[in-house]
Image (cartoon, rainbow, N blue to C red):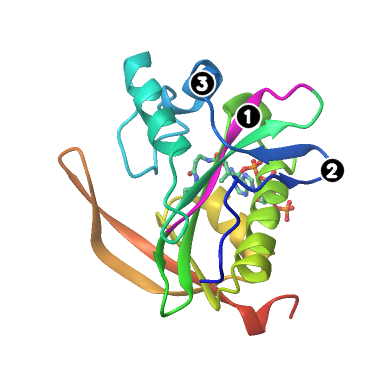
Amino acid sequence: MAKQPKSHPILETPRLRLRQFRAADAEAIHDCFGDAQTMRFWSRLPHSKRIETERAVRNMTDCTPAYYRFWAVADAATDRCLGLASYHDGHIRSKRAAIGYMIEPSRLRQGLGSEAVGAVLEYCFGVLGLNRLEALINPANAASQALVAKFGFRCEGVLRQHLRVGEEWRDEMMFALLASERGG
Ligand SMILES: CC(C)(COP(=O)(O)OP(=O)(O)OC[C@H]1O[C@@H](n2cnc3c(N)ncnc32)[C@H](O)[C@@H]1OP(=O)(O)O)[C@@H](O)C(=O)NCCC(=O)NCCS
């Protein structure tokens, strides 16, 4: 990956400000992590206690930019945290990473997920100079599949029992977008 800025980069879109997480975001992001529907296809079980979300926020605040970075997806007007966006599983030599994203249940289908993901793609391809971005998506997660398809991600196949969540093995679909395919 290209040389990283030392401070946490802020990504701005018309309605959103993607910024570093802070402890005070735990209350708002718990609307996501504590919600069974939002967490249905996530890599972890829903949080039953606020303290689990507080721990997650601490982990998302401290990033290792060569491998992963999380942004709080905040309302540009109020700064309330409405979700998260990330790149993770970064492979420096191969110039590739995976992306993750989540929007709170009361704000779905307003184009906010697309705005946040668009900003992360811009950062990963433009600033980090990545060549390939991946999104591992549950076969039943229609919203996530529709979101990445908008940006030109293509499904490359199904990874069988790729994820273990609680006691359950889950398949994941590998979606990917190459730098050369952007805007195409
Ligand atoms: C995936 C997620 C971030 C989408 O957020 P969002 O803000 O509702 O997305 P957008 O409003 O930008 O919609 C993006 C596209 O997906 C489509 N879409 C959204 N929800 C959908 C659904 N439930 N079923 C089918 N399509 C859906 C929209 O119509 C839109 O396509 P369009 O612009 O062509 O109409 C949100 O559903 C979420 O947080 N899910 C739970 C967490 C999760 O599963 N994250 C992904 C893990 S891989």
Q: Earlier in the sequence, mark 2 or mark 1?
A: 2
Read off the magenta span.
78-88
In the rendered view, tell whether residue 65 sits above or below residue 156: above
86 part of magenta stretch: yes
Neighbour tally class for label 3: few under 14, some 14-19, many 20 plus, Cα within 10 Å: many
Numbered circle sitting on residue 122: none
Viewer-closest of 130 and 147:
130
Amino acid identity at mark 2: Pro
Which of the 4 quarters of the picture holds residue 131? bottom right
Residue positioned most to the bottom: 180
Gap in Å between the C-alphas at discs 3 and 2? 23 Å
11 part of magenta stretch: no
Give residue 33's position: percent from left, percent from top: 43, 27
Residue 71 as seen in the image, left or right of residue 44: right
Give residue 50's position: percent from left, percent from top: 38, 15
Majority secondary structure of magenta residues = strand
What residue does disc 3 label?
31
Q: Residue at x 63, y 29 (%)?
A: 82
Q: Secondary structure at mark 3?
A: helix
What residue does disc 2 label?
14
Residue positioned most to the right: 14
What residue does disc 1 label?
82
Give residue 41's position: percent from left, percent from top: 39, 44
Look at the numbered discs 2 and 1 and tell me whether their residues touch, using CB distance below 8 Å. no
In the rendered view, tell whether residue 47 sits above or below residue 11: above
